[in-house]
Amino acid sequence: VFIENNPNVKPGDFVDVKVTDSSDYDLFAEVVKEP
């Protein structure tokens, strides 16, 4: 999942997201709730 426009999220973080787009192999999302 690619999380757009959120520099506070680091690899390994668990956050709630809303999927906003997809491609053949990837999902794109925005953060709904940070830890």
Image (cartoon, helix red, strand yellow):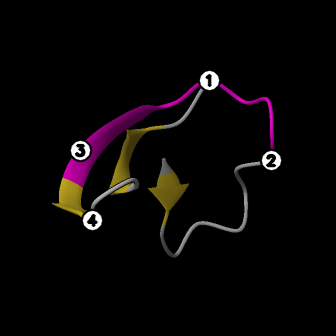
Q: Residues within 10 Å of mark 1 (few under 14, many from 20)?
A: few
Q: Which residue is label 2 attached to? A: 10
Amino acid type, residue under disc 3 in the picture: Lys
Q: Which residue is mark 1?
A: 14
Q: Which mark is residue 18?
A: 3
Q: Residues within 10 Å of mark 4 (few under 14, many from 20)?
A: few
* Quadrant in the rendering for residue 7: bottom right
Mark 1 → mark 4, Cα distance in angstroms: 22 Å
Marks 4/2: CA–CA distance: 22 Å
Q: Cα distance, mark 3 to mark 2? A: 17 Å
What residue is pinned by disc 4? 23
Numbered disc 1: secondary structure = loop
Mark 3 touches mark 2? (CB < 8 Å): no
Q: Earlier in the sequence, mark 4 or mark 2?
A: 2
Question: Disc 3, disc 4: CB below 8 Å?
Answer: no
Give the x, y percent position of residue 21: 20, 64
Identify the residue at horizontal 80%, vertical 42% (top origin).
11
Q: Between disc 3 and disc 2, whose residue precedes?
A: 2
Q: Residues within 10 Å of mark 3 (few under 14, many from 20)?
A: few
Q: Bounds of the magenta span?
A: 11-19
Residue 4 % position (x, y): 48, 70
Give the residue displayed 70% in from the left and 50% down from the top: 9
* In magenta segment, residue 16: yes
Image height check: is 35 above or below 7? above
The disc labelled 1 sits on which kind of residue? Phe
